[in-house]
Image: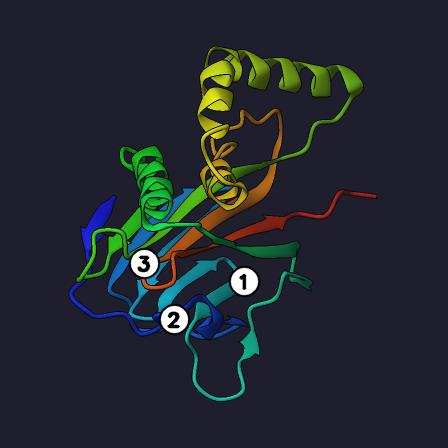
């Protein structure tokens, strides 16, 4: 799902983003509910970036007032019945062309998915915030892990050579931004939770903030 948001940026730079868990639902410009792993997951686009609500967890990455925590590189915690993990990184693109190409690659990958939400902010078609679910998997035996690897390899073998040739023309930051959505459709042998990715694109500074979150049921002892 892609939508144009009727609001200007509330966080025009990557370093303005903050991170918070446990906030109540904030006013959203667009909401996409998706059923996954027995939970209703709400992907929420805010005037100040994103919020995801999944069962007992609320994750907010936005320009938040007060003493909000800066966006961490990594974070983890336990919530009732689940373990939560979060990671974030920022890609600084070398020039405007590289930035636009990276943003367009993310939008194209998510365009036809019913479990992804992309919002365009006014002023630039590359001022984008996107969220997408991915599948969290647990491969049990070595045989199962091998089957999963073969499946993923078979899916990508036809594309690898062309992708590598294209990567040679891009800088490290652009390659990181383009590759960040590479395993959104990894096949699952046993789903034990959910995961989601987000992308926050800032044309003014040619930065793309990428986050990855996982909410997983702990393994039974």
Q: Describe residue 104's horizontal placement relative to residue 172 as left or right.
A: left
Residue displayed at 38% across by 50% down? 95
For mark 3, give the secondary structure: loop
**Is 193 in front, or is 87?**
87
x, y percent for residue 140: 75, 26
Residue position for label 2: 25
| Upstream in sequence: badge 2 or badge 3 | 2
Q: Position of residue 3 (x, y in %)?
A: 20, 51
From this view, report whether residue 23 is shown above or below residue 103.
below
* Residue at numbered disc 1: 56
> Callout 2 environment at 10 Å: few (<14), some (14 to 19), or many (20+)?
some
Q: Which residue is mark 3?
A: 203
Q: Is residue 114 visible?
A: no
**30, 177: nearer the viewer:** 177
Using the numbered discs, state the Cα–Cα distance from disc 2 to disc 3 in whole angstroms: 28 Å
Badge 1 crowding class, 10 Å Cα cut-off, few under 14, some 14 to 19, many 20 or more, is few
Q: Secondary structure at mark 1?
A: loop
Query: Image quadrant for the C terminus?
Result: top right
Rounded to the nearest angstrom, the CA distance separating label 3 from label 1 is 34 Å
Q: In the image, is 66 to the left or to the right of 108?
A: right
Mark 2 or mark 1: which comes first in sequence?
Answer: 2
Residue drawn at (45%, 60%), measured in percent from left and top?
53
């Amino acid at each position: 799902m892609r939508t144009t948001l009727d609001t200007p940026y509330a966080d025009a730079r990557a370093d303005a983003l903050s991170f918070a868990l446990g906030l109540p639902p904030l006013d959203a410009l667009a909401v996409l509910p998706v059923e996954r792993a027995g939970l209703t997951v709400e992907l929420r686009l805010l005037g100040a970036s994103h919020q995801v609500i999944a069962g007992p967890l609320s994750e907010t990455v936005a320009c938040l007032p007060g003493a909000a925590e800066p966006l961490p590189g990594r974070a983890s915690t336990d919530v009732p019945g689940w373990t939560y993990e979060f990671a974030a990184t920022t890609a600084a693109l070398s020039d405007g062309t590289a930035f636009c190409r990276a943003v367009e690659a993310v939008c194209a990958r998510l365009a036809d998915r019913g479990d992804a939400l992309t919002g365009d902010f006014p002023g630039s078609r590359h001022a984008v915030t996107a969220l997408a679910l991915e599948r969290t998997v647990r491969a049990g035996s070595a045989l199962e892990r091998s089957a999963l690897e073969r499946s993923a390899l078979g899916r990508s073998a036809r594309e690898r050579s062309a992708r590598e040739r294209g990567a040679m023309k891009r800088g490290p930051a652009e390659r990181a931004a383009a590759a960040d959505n590479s395993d959104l459709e990894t096949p699952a042998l046993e789903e034990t939770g959910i995961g989601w990715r987000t992308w926050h694109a800032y044309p003014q500074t040619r930065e793309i903030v990428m986050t990855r979150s996982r909410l997983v049921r702990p393994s039974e002892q």
